Amino acid sequence: MRSDSHPDFGTGNGDGKQMTTLSQMYKQKAKSGSEITTKKTYMVPYSELYLEPGDNIRPLNQEWAEHMRDLWIAGADLPPLSVTVTEKGVRVDDGQHRYVGAGMAIEAGTNIIRIECRDFIGTELERLAHQAGSNDSLPITPIQRAQQYNRARKQGYEIAEISKAFHRSVSDIESHLQLLSSGEVLIGMVEAGEVAPTTAVALSREHGPKAGAVAEQKLAEAKASGKNRLTKSAAMPQFSAAKARRLVELMAAFEFTDDGYTAPDEVYLEAMGILAEYREKHGQPQPEVKPSTPEADDEYLPLTKQDIIDHSGVAVWACAAAAFGEKDEYTFNESKYAHTWAADSVENPQVVTIPADAIQRALDLIEQHDSSSALREWVDKTYTDEGQREDMFDRFLTVYRENRTAIKSVPAYLNLLQCTLSSSWSNIRTLRLAIRQAIYELTDKSAIAKAN
């Protein structure tokens, strides 16, 4: 039995229960006391709709348009398009993928005569904000959001007005606008997902026109260490407060006079090391120091990278590179610092105080040089084609470094390679799998041998 206290909103659904629709509920709202209202939509012929080139916040995503085509063909109930009536016809403000998908479905034979549309009511700024907030379930990129803010800015709207319309903070608007001024290189890296928008903005503020070049260099360093993205900590490393305090302590031991300064060798060399590390991390230029001649210093030290390696060995070069960065030539004092450190002990220096991270960098550089040299020699003997050599060397070296915890030396790595099929070497993914399988099998056999 139906209760008289409730109006008749619908008909049975076959199981004795009553069904209703919003339309029926709206018609009887006076009787029911409901406060329901309606916002009209219109069925607009497809031929009267159009897209304004460049108006949409994002370029067309072909894959998503094809997805919408399939939904149209399947008869899915899609949301209405937001439109504005212009002299040209009915412009699609939001829903370009639904519109394009409908056209593709029509071409495929689906009968779509009209599409449900709703008027967009509001100012031009509100329309731009609406486009940014409603996007066919596809997220907009930081660059696309920045471009939308910029469109509003060019139309004369103040940042505070844009902030209110887009429901974003003023700092968010300013940061995105700054992103558009960071240069093509950084914008491209943001679009590729290689650097975060906030990092790009920070680099732009820090380095100005040189930000793109700095970002490319830092990204190359990050990729060399096995990372795919440039983080802010890697792009803009903060200098250690402990090292800054240590530098002040060292400078207190300097004696300054009108003729210059004097300091004990070990104090001077340690202070030089800290300053060089700061310059390397923060992109500060090295001071123009004229290298001393052997006659003036009564001592000859090699200054170029190759000369240091040839005359003094890889360990000295590694100390120089760890303290002052990898470069083709070093000053006399930098070379002297590296020679003093290496002659003392690379791993456990006693004469001078070397930061722990610098010691580790030096040890890593020595290991990398030794391993790359041995691997290079093997590759050169194995492959005759010069172009193939470079490709294979990079691939073998990358996989070797990825498995350094399991593979202790290049000879051990070469032995593992001999246990794999050479056909797996032509692709880095198959090479990785082959090496991991060889490591697993070797470890498993070792465990069995120990158990027996």
Image: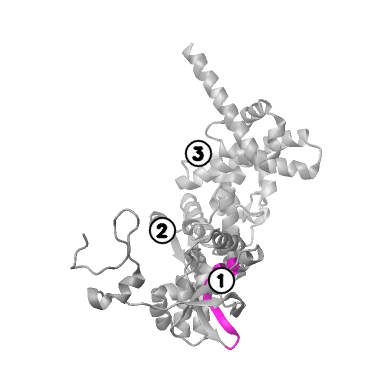
Given residues 290 and 363, the one toward you in this image is 363
Q: Which quadrant of the figure contains the N terminus?
A: bottom left
Instruction: Residue at 46% x, 52% y: name it.
Output: 267
Find the residue positioned furthest to the right: 384
First in sequence, mark 2 or 3: give its number: 2
Q: Which label belongs to residue 347?
A: 3
Residue 367 visible within the image: no
The residue wearing badge 1 is: 96
Instruction: Residue at 49% x, 83% y: name it.
Output: 153
Q: Which label belongs to residue 244?
A: 2
Helix, strand or loop at mark 1:
helix
Given residues 83 and 203, the one toward you in this image is 83
Q: Residues within 10 Å of mark 1 (few under 14, many from 20)?
A: many
Image location (x, y in percent) of residue 340: 55, 45
Given residues 265 and 1, the one toward you in this image is 1
Given residues 167 and 317, the one toward you in this image is 167
Find the residue positioned furthest to the top: 452
Of the residues tagged 3 and 1, which is closer to the observer? 1
